Amino acid sequence: MFKTLVSVSLAAGIAAGTCGSAFAEDKTPVKIGWAAWSDAEFVTKLAAKLIKDELGHEVELVQTDIAPLYQGVSRGDLDAMMMAWLPETHADYFAKIKDKVTTLGTVYDGAKLGWVVPKYIPEDAIASIDDLKKDDVKDKLKGRIEGIDPGAGLTRLSAQAVKDYELDGYKLQISSEAGMLTSIDRAMRNEQWFVATSWSPHWMFGKYELRYIDDPKTALGKAEHVDVLARKDFEKDNPEVAGFLSRMKLPIGDLEAAMFNAQETSYEKAVDKYIADHPDQIKAWLAKEGG
């Protein structure tokens, strides 16, 4: 393993003309933090494989909650994170540490938060969040809104949406992504009515027939971008990996397809397939020329 790592590092060092620094950087693994969201898991594991296999740097993946991610990068305990949802979803977290981190780039655009219902619910029954106030709709939904983690930005915005829309008699069920998906799966199999907090990109849209309902008050925000944040000085300490992360950008459609594939197989297999299916994109991220 050590011989393989050194040979890859040497090749990278010669290519960059910085053989000495390549050896120095490899002594400390690149620490990338991620929270247990399916989009974050895919892009983080994709980046980790390319950093290790193509750039010759060891990578340590650190899974934790959203708040510790931001704190970890700002304190320098983590080198980077790839799931900063801005400008609204993670606004509170980002505001506290924005002067202590560097934004390397945007890993994907067009991210969205919202509430979803199954397509078998007629649109004339539920077309927007306002429709949840109808008595018959509230009864069928049992006054429940299926939610995710207590610390998630989507949870904070959804709790505010309940107030903004005056959804009296409703309870936002605090759970986790896995818990929310279990509830959706059970309801879909029995064709029961439900409303759930959700976001795009997500593999659930490949598995289930779901639709977003309108949010006329934009309580859940508008389209978002997902950024890569790094600790201060990371670009100076590890310019090769920082440059790679700054160039890494996925079309959201490609990402959702890969995430669904990960659910059907595994994240490791989905990462391998993505790399095999997108050679030109990968070369651009790695700043490699030629065929």
Image: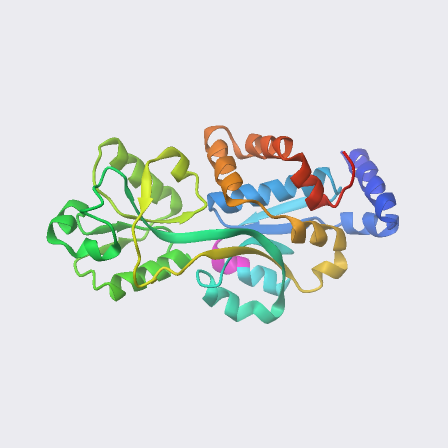
Magenta region: which residues?
A: 64-69
Q: At 39% from the left edge and 53% from the top edge, which residue is drawn?
A: 113
From the image, which quarter does the N terminus lie in? top right
283 in relation to 150, above or below: above
> What secondary structure do most residues of the magenta stretch adopt?
helix
Q: Position of residue 252 (x, y in %)?
A: 51, 45
Q: Position of residue 254 (x, y in %)?
A: 53, 39
Q: Is residue 199 magenta?
A: no
Q: Is residue 205 left or right of residue 191?
A: right
Q: Write down the quadrant of residue 229 in the picture.
A: bottom right
Q: Is residue 196 left or right of residue 122?
A: right
Residue 77, visible in the rendered structure? no
Q: How is the image coloured?
A: rainbow
Relative depth, front residue between 53 and 74: 53
143 in relation to 73, above or below: above
Q: Is residue 29 left or right of residue 10?
A: left
Relative depth, front residue between 33 and 189: 189
Outermost residue toward the top?
Answer: 265
Q: At 34% from the left edge and 43% from the top edge, which residue is drawn?
A: 179
